[in-house]
Image (cartoon, grey):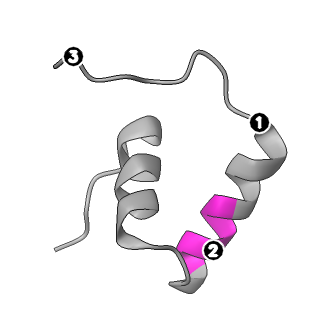
Amino acid sequence: MPRRFPEWVNTEVLVKAIKMREEGNLSKQLNLWIENLLEIEKNN
């Protein structure tokens, strides 16, 4: 099944998700989505 990506992202929601990620309050699945969307490399 091909991967689905949104054609657009609501900026307000994205900013809130990034802040939550930085605070460590984001679910694992949403964190992976943000990492893929913004091409963030994991810090191992």
Assess whether residue 37 is covered by the magenta stretch: no
| Amino acid type of the residue tagged 1 in the rendering | Asn
Callout 2 secondary element = helix
Span shown in magenta: 17-22
In the image, taking residue 36 as reference, residue 2 lies left or right, namely left
Q: Residue at x 58, y 15 (%)?
A: 7
In this rendering, is residue 36 above or below 17?
A: above
Q: Residue at x 37, y 22 (%)?
A: 4
Callout 3 secondary element = loop
Who comes first in sequence, dot 2 or dot 3?
3
Residue assigned mark 1: 10
Neighbours of disc 2 within 10 Å: few (<14), some (14-19), many (20+): some
Work out how far the residue at label 2 is from the one at label 3, CA to CA, in angstroms. 28 Å
Residue assigned mark 3: 2
Return the mark for residue 20: 2
In the image, taking residue 27 as reference, residue 10 lies left or right, namely right
Q: Position of residue 33 (x, y in %)?
A: 41, 48
Assess whether residue 20 is covered by the magenta stretch: yes
